[in-house]
């Protein structure tokens, strides 16, 4: 079975989050987050980032150790680039030192683990921007309805991780949410309709 890992660095809040789900939308690695790190000094910030990124790849390695033939694709978002520019690193707007640190360490651990497990893959390019409000609201409702993420305060990072894992875009949103429903709700349950009451003649 294939799995997708979602890795999200919020450069505004200095917040790092990740999770891993399989193709049946079951959680292989529960969502983890550092919380906001922007108040930390540079040294402490980098230490927290290092621990979190190492933890992310350690969890992926555990999956490979139990299932060596597993395929894992990493969907990632490291910089808060606005649409349509996906890479952010331009002459006009360069990433911060902390974002560069995250990016370099993310690639370093990926390359090391990739040598050991060739079926580890990374999406060709990082996720473009964050989903707009309409898309995100549709996802929130679906995740809540399907019992995946409760729609409450403090869960925004979970919604963004799921958007990453599903590679959700404005054009694919409705189709992917429909696919989620097919996976999570058995056909029999969808087809059951309340019986009409028979009236006496």
Image (cartoon, rainbow, N blue to C red):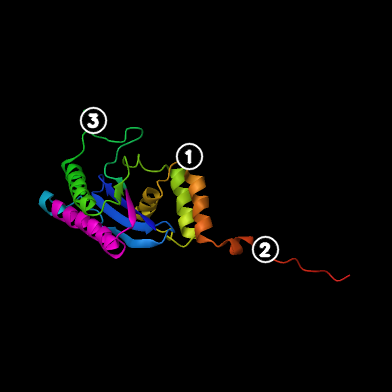
User: What range is drawn magenta here?
Assistant: 46-74
Secondary structure under badge 3?
A: loop
Position of residue 105 measured from the top left corner of the image (x, y, whole percent)? 18, 48
The span from disc 1 to disc 2 (Cα, nearest Å) is 31 Å
* Residue under pointer 1: 171
Front position in the image: 172 or 35: 172
Q: Give the side of residue 105 with respect to residue 147, left or right.
A: left
Mostly what secondary structure, the magenta segment? helix
Indicate whether residue 8 is drawn in magenta. no
Q: Quadrant of residue 58?
A: bottom left
- Which of the marked residues, 1 or 3, is nearer the chain's N terminus? 3
Residue 34 seen anywhere in this rendered image of the structure: no
* Residue under pointer 2: 193
**Residue 144 versus residue 123 in the image, above or below:** below
Q: Are marks 1 and 2 in contact (CB under 8 Å)?
A: no
Front position in the image: 177 or 151: 177
- Which of the marked residues, 1 or 2, is nearer the chain's N terminus? 1
Secondary structure under badge 1?
A: loop
């Amino acid at each position: 079975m294939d799995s997708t890992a979602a890795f999200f660095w919020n450069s505004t809040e200095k917040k790092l989050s990740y999770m891993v789900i399989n193709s049946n939308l079951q959680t292989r690695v529960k969502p983890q987050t550092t919380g906001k790190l922007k108040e930390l000094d540079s040294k402490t910030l980098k230490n927290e980032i290092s621990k979190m990124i190492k933890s992310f790849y350690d969890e992926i390695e555990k999956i490979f150790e139990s299932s060596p033939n597993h395929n894992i694709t990493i969907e990632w978002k490291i910089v808060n680039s606005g649409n349509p520019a996906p890479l952010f690193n331009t002459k006009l707007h360069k990433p911060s030192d902390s974002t560069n640190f995250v990016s370099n360490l993310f690639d370093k651990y990926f390359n090391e683990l990739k040598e050991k497990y060739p079926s580890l893959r990374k999406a060709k390019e990082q996720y473009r921007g964050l989903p707009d409000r309409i898309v995100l609201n549709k996802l929130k409702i679906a995740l809540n309805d399907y019992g995946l993420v409760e729609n409450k305060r403090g869960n925004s990072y979970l919604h963004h991780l799921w958007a990453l894992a599903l590679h959700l875009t404005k054009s694919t949103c409705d189709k992917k949410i429909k696919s989620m429903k097919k996976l999570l709700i058995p056909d029999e349950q969808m087809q059951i309709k309340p019986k009409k009451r028979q009236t006496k003649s």
